[in-house]
Image (cartoon, rainbow, N blue to C red):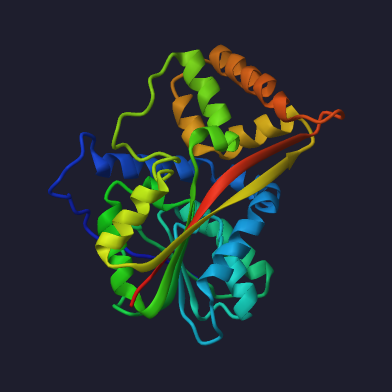
């Protein structure tokens, strides 16, 4: 079951220097476009990311009677990890703005025997749930892309039951996340693109964990805790790394949208050359990347 919730977009009074509604519409389209790639590559990606999903669920301290919300679930994580622990999908709600990504999540739930997962097509900034409805709110690599993050965090705080936990994972600084930053760096160098403007959401937008913790504290979260975790993705070759990146990395493919076929070929070859720094003597690629887990409680 995939439910679509439509709400009118709301403009923040402190409008950024870019159009957040246009940005989010572009994000939705980009993730829909790469959904076919995720359908193909999610087993390889999740093999590297699974330890993080397990850690997020552990930090959430989910109990048998708890109700859980997964924000920006994508192809279903960490909702699926939480479902496996509870052995029930009745208490799990997972949202994402991409209907195509949710369709993959639905297939994954059903493959585990959960025939009616509660998957909702919803903008993470337009959360539409009751106050105190959830004992835990999870989000893996989603909050960095929200233009009006503080508004969304206020709603999440309100939707948590007393003693409930917000548990999220964000990426560390680019130098510690070559899984994403290496392709983006090569693209920007070849196209002579400047860094993203200040204030524009991007994968590394919450790498300053002290600043992120301060934002949570001001909203009312307590007992805030963070920890770093190194994940490693394995590839048979540099070509496999390139093929997966080309098929599912929406931020990278967006930068290449207006490039010619010749430019794209040159850039992908450059990415293949660059990732060889992580190769072993047999040509297998091991790409380490650092995530930050952040936990906040509601009193």
Question: Which residue lies at the image location 26% right of the left edge and 42% below the top edge?
Answer: 20
Residue 101 image offset from top left, x and y in percent: 52, 53
Q: Quadrant of the C terminus?
A: bottom left
- Looking at the picture, tell me which residue is in the foreground, 228 or 287: 228
Q: Is residue 123 visible?
A: no
Residue 100 image offset from top left, x and y in percent: 50, 52
Q: Is residue 167 visible?
A: yes
In the image, residue 218 sits, relative to residue 43, either above or below, namely below
In the image, residue 37 sits, relative to residue 1, either above or below, namely above
Horizontally, is 232 left or right of 58 in the view? Answer: right
- Classify residue 109 by image quadrant: bottom right
Q: Which residue is situated farthest in the left direction here?
A: 13
Q: How many marks?
A: 0
In the image, residue 166 sits, relative to residue 283, either above or below, namely below
Horizontally, is 29 left or right of 55 in the view? Answer: left
Question: Which residue lies at the image location 51% right of the left edge and 28% below the top edge?
Answer: 184
Residue 200 image offset from top left, x and y in percent: 32, 36
Question: Which residue lies at the image location 60% right of the left edge and 32% below the top edge?
Answer: 246
Horizontally, is 131 left or right of 206 in the view? Answer: left
- Classify residue 77 by image quadrant: bottom right
């Amino acid at each position: 079951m995939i439910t679509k919730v439509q709400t009118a977009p709301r403009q923040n009074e402190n409008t950024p220097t870019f159009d957040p509604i246009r940005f989010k519409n572009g994000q939705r389209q980009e993730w829909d476009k790469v959904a076919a790639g995720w359908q193909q590559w999610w087993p390889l990606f999740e093999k590297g990311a699974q330890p993080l999903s397990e850690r997020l669920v552990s930090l959430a301290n989910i109990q048998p009677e708890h109700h859980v919300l997964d924000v920006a679930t994508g192809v279903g994580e960490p909702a699926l990890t939480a479902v496996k622990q509870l052995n029930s999908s009745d208490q799990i709600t997972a949202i994402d703005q991409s209907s195509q990504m949710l369709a993959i999540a639905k297939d994954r739930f059903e493959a585990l025997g959960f025939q009616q997962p509660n998957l909702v097509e919803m903008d993470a900034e337009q959360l539409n749930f009751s106050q105190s409805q959830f004992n835990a709110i999870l989000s893996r690599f989603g909050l960095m892309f929200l233009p009006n993050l503080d508004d969304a965090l206020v709603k999440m705080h309100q939707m948590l039951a007393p003693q409930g936990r917000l548990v999220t994972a964000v990426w560390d600084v680019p130098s510690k996340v070559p899984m994403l930053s290496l392709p983006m760096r090569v693209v920007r160098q070849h196209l002579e693109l400047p860094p993203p403007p200040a204030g524009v959401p991007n994968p590394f937008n919450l790498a300053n964990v002290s600043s992120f913790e301060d934002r949570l504290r001001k909203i009312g979260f307590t007992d805030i805790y963070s920890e770093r975790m190194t994940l490693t993705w394995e590839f048979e070759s540099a070509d496999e790394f390139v093929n997966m990146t080309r098929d599912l990395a929406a931020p990278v493919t967006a930068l290449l949208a207006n490039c010619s076929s010749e430019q794209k070929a040159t850039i992908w070859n450059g990415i293949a050359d660059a990732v060889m720094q992580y190769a072993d003597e047999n040509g297998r690629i091991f790409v380490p990347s650092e995530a930050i887990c952040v936990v906040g409680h509601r009193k």
